[in-house]
């Protein structure tokens, strides 16, 4: 007992003690209620985005706060990325900030929570987020999303308590919520990995079947090619001009079929090798972007013509040779152009352009369409596993595949889109990627 406490009359000391006990009991009840609500909120969700959203909403309800965000670490870009944000002016999903800056960055680096009375007075406060949203951060609590062992996977922040600033007593509540949230995120990740492992196992059998099914197709193309050649030869005796035109068209179509079945066979083998754990590194060789684009256009032109969409090229012949994995670059450009064609109305166009990027010592490749454009939520999910496909039967993986190819070349891909106007993908590639050696 302190000297000050001894000076308080005994009945008053008893009341003071009782008040203190009541406050502790109330705090424990708040913590238990937070634990109950977060368990209830997260128990039926296995998708990370649903987990994050429910956890954040629970925290705001329990603490009566005006806003909050969950940021997850992206080791590749070394950023904390806003996965979900709630408030009057939420931060757009996908917004990133350097993971060593701001109060959030300090908590992420130290792994220790912080209670901030006034963010404006803290020199670490990252003003750019407030400037982006127009929302002013005042009081806040920031806690790490941390496994029992290991480094944090992100941070959980709650802002601007209604009716007064956030106090230390709210910290224990948020720590409980963040602990359950981290556990739920890890469970969702493990669930996703288990599904992927099951899918990979199934893919091995599918690849085997596809490879076997391709063999009669490839043989049939050869036989049909020879048969049509003989028929056209007979036609030339009746109508030489028509025979010549038909032969040229047949040769072109058979060339496309032979090339594309060969590419399908190669891709199937690549998938089968991946299932076995045998993934090959990029094979960088000197190549011309114009030649790769010509092969893509040749393969996909019939599809574009069927939809009355014009495929155009611009400036590609002026590009210098670059070191690239030609097969992977073909796949990336094929995905972008193939995705663009269904988005373009009849009479529209898809233009594949090229410019020398002297400042970056590389090239800039653009794929621009005159289609319907895309809403922000679709655009922001591009190049991620969360990509949203608007095509019937689409998987949403096309742009993620493109980004993986660009990353393997040490490049960068961005997108510009306006609804009702069109979309442009911009790929910047170095002339010589890291790890590419002349042959």
Image: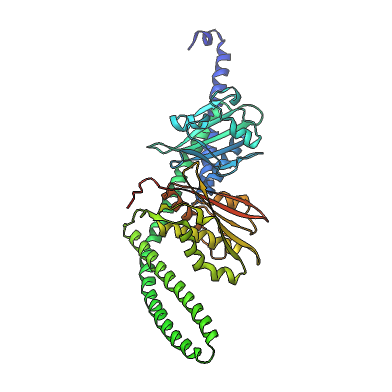
Q: Residue at x 32, y 53 (%)?
A: 439
Which quarter of the picture shows residue 30?
Answer: top right
Q: Is residue 97 above or below residue 222?
A: above
Q: Given the current orientation, which residue lies at the most extreme right position?
A: 420
Residue 187: image x %, image y %?
43, 48
Colour scheme of the picture: rainbow
Return the residue nearer the eye: 345 or 283: 283
Q: Residue at x 55, y 12 (%)?
A: 10
User: Can residue 202 be seen here?
Assistant: no
User: Can residue 112 be seen here?
Assistant: yes
Residue 386: image x %, image y %?
52, 52
Return the residue nearer the eye: 341 or 152: 341
Q: How many dots with numbers? A: 0
Q: Is residue 324 above or below residue 176?
A: below
Q: Residue at x 50, y 7 (%)?
A: 3
Residue 28: image x %, image y %?
52, 32
Residue 432: image x %, image y %?
40, 47
Horizontal side, residue 397 vs residue 198: left or right: right
Which quarter of the picture shows residue 14?
Answer: top right
């Amino acid at each position: 007992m302190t000297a000050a406490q001894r000076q308080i009359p005994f009945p008053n000391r008893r009341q003071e003690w009782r008040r203190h006990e009541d406050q502790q009991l109330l705090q424990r009840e708040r913590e238990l209620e937070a634990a109950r609500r977060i368990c209830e909120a997260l128990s039926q969700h296995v998708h990370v985005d649903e987990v994050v959203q429910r956890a954040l909403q629970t925290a705001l309800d329990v603490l009566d706060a005006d806003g909050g965000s969950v940021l997850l670490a992206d080791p590749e870009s070394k950023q904390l990325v806003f996965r979900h944000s709630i408030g009057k002016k939420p931060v757009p999903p996908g917004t990133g900030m350097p993971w060593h800056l701001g109060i959030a960055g300090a908590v992420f680096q130290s792994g220790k929570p912080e209670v901030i009375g006034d963010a404006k007075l803290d020199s670490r406060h990252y003003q750019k987020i407030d400037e982006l949203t127009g929302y002013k951060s005042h009081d806040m609590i920031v806690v790490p999303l941390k496994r029992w062992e290991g480094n944090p996977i992100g941070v959980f922040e709650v802002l601007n308590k209604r009716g007064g600033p956030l106090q230390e007593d709210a910290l224990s509540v948020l720590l409980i919520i963040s602990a359950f949230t981290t556990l739920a995120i890890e469970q969702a990740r493990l669930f996703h990995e288990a599904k992927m492992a099951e899918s990979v196992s199934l893919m091995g059998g599918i690849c085997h079947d596809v490879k076997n099914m391709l063999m009669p197709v490839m043989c049939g193309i050869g036989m049909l090619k020879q048969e049509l050649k003989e028929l056209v030869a007979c036609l030339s005796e009746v109508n030489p001009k028509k025979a010549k035109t038909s032969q040229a068209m047949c040769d072109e179509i058979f060339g496309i079929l032979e090339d594309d079945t060969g590419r399908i066979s190669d891709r199937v083998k690549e998938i089968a090798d991946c299932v076995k754990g045998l993934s090959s590194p990029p094979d960088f060789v000197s190549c011309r972007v114009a030649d790769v684009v010509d092969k893509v256009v040749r393969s996909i032109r019939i599809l574009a013509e069927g939809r009355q969409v014009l495929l155009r090229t611009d400036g590609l012949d002026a590009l210098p040779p670059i070191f690239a994995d030609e097969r992977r670059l073909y796949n990336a450009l094929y995905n972008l152009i193939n995705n663009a064609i269904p988005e373009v109305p009849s009479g529209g166009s898809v233009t594949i352009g090229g410019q020398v990027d002297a400042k970056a010592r590389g090239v800039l490749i653009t794929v621009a369409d005159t289609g319907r454009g895309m809403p922000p939520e679709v655009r922001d999910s591009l190049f991620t596993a969360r990509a949203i496909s608007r095509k019937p039967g689409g998987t949403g993986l096309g742009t993620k595949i493109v980004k993986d190819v660009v990353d393997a070349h040490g490049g960068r891909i961005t997108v510009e889109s306006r609804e009702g106007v069109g979309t442009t993908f911009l790929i910047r590639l170095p002339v010589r990627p890291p790890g590419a050696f002349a042959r």
